[in-house]
Structure formats: C-alpha cells, structure tokens
Image (cartoon, rainbow, N blue to C red):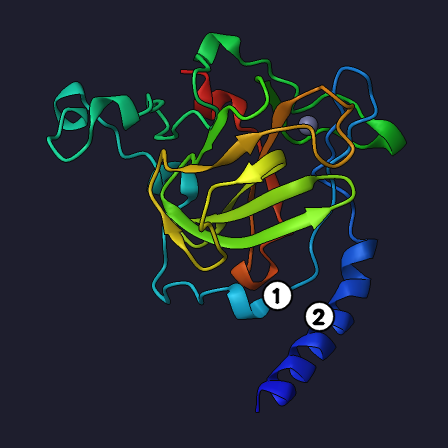
Amino acid sequence: MRALALFLFCALAACRFEPVSERPADAECDCADGRDVADARPEADTSTVTPPPTEETPPAAEADTVRVTPDEAGAPDAPARDVPAVSDAGLAMPVAGIEPDDLVDTFEAARSEGRTHNAIDILAPRGTPVRAAVAGEVVRLFTSDKGGLTIYQLGADGRTVYYYAHLDSYAPGLAAGQRVRRGQVLGGVGDSGNAAPGNTHLHFAIWRTADPADFWDGTPVNPYPLLAR
Ligand SMILES: [Zn+2]
C-alpha cells in the first residue's frame, strides 16, 4: 500500500512538474548584486496541502488584520519578549529585530528577463530568527537552486501564501502540515540558494492563490505596505 501511495505521489509530482517549470517566474529575487533569483516553485505536493475551509473566506488583507492592542499583546500567556510587533495590516515582522523603517520597497524593482522582484529582501545577519508573518499552516519546505531553503506558508484564509527564501536553517521540528502561530520562529536568515555568498537576507513574498493546491502560484501582493506601518 505504501508502495502504491508512493507511486501515485511520484506520478502526480512528475506530471505536475513540467507545467510548473513553464510558469512565469514571479518570485524572482534579485538583490543588490543582481545575482539573486529565488523564483523556484516546488513541484506540487498535494499530500501536504490541507483542503481549505469550504466557506468563503475574506481576502488575506482582511483576514489577517487582527489588530493587537497593547492590552492584548500583554496577555499573560505570551511572554513579552516573544511577541513581535504587529503592523496595522496584522503582520508580524518576519525577521527579528527589524523595524518598519528598515524596510526597502523593492517589490516592483526590475529584474532580469523583464521580470519584477515581486518580493522584498530583508537584510539581517546569518541566523537571525525568521518569524511567521501570520498564523497559518506550513504547506511546504522546499530546497531549490535559486531560493535555497524555503518555506511556503498558507494563511488562515486558505488563499494567501507567504514565502520565505534563502534560509540558513529551519526551526527544529518544522514540517509541512504544521500549524504555526504568528511570530513563531520558522528558521534563520541565510544566503542559501543563489543569494550572493554572505549576502544574508530574507526574500519575503506574498501572493494570492486561486487554489491552495497550487500554493506555489498566484497573484503577487506587495509585502512592503503591509509591514511598513
Ligand atoms: Zn529577493
């Protein structure tokens, strides 16, 4: 039975892989030196995708806009040191120690082959904790030539994907299918993939997917204004 399941999985992955490679690379990462491209999409792995709720869910920008007032942030079950600041849009800063003013909006920056960045790069020293921007589910841990160690996370709305690339490491025990809290440490900043050696940063992208089974594909959303205030 396991062999059959494995065969079906491989067959599915194989038949999915080819079209993926032909998709427009919309998560390109190109940093200061222009050599950094993190546009890899993993082959489909439907076994790790939890079907979304059947009811209609609001857009991510609304679903994740749970504002945390100082009073709420001071809840006794959440140690203050582990509660990252949350933006007006409800996102936790995905890199520890980074302030909104540190961010640079390179979402629309031109990249090679006529593409755009469709992401922002957050520079930080190697190993700096990478945090979940929102609560949701880790749908895929994937290692690609371009993105290096990457994480695909599906937000609670089941439609918004959060992509973290060039990691140095994953948090111990992190696995696909795992639910994570907003602010939970997912890994550490690095320069894996085709980031220039030593150019440690988080390539952070958000997109809206029409189908969570196709979590690697969707309409890019600029993270900058969602994090900058
Ligand atoms: Zn990038």
Q: Residue at x 62, y 48 (%)?
A: 218
Q: How many marks?
A: 2
In the rendered image, which residue does mark 2 sit on?
13
Q: Residue at x 63, y 28 (%)?
A: 190
Q: Residue at x 41, y 55 (%)?
A: 178
Mark 2 closeness class: few <14, some 14–19, many ≥20 residues within 10 Å: some
Rendered view: 80 above or below 206: above
- Residue 125: x, y in percent? 58, 17
Q: Which mark is residue 123?
A: none
Q: Horizontal placement of 84 versus 133: left or right?
A: left
- Residue 63: x, y in percent? 34, 43
Asked if the residue at label 2 sits under 8 Å from ligand 1, the reply is: no
Q: Horizontal placement of 74 versus 39: left or right?
A: left
Asked whether 13 or 199 is in front, the reply is 199
Asked whether 114 or 16 is in front, the reply is 16
- Circles 2, 1 touching at the beta carbon (< 8 Å): yes
In the rendered image, which residue does mark 1 sit on?
45
The three-letter amino acid code for the residue at tag 2 is: Ala
Q: Horizontal placement of 79 versus 220: left or right?
A: left
Residue located farthest toward the right when viewing the structure as drawn: 113
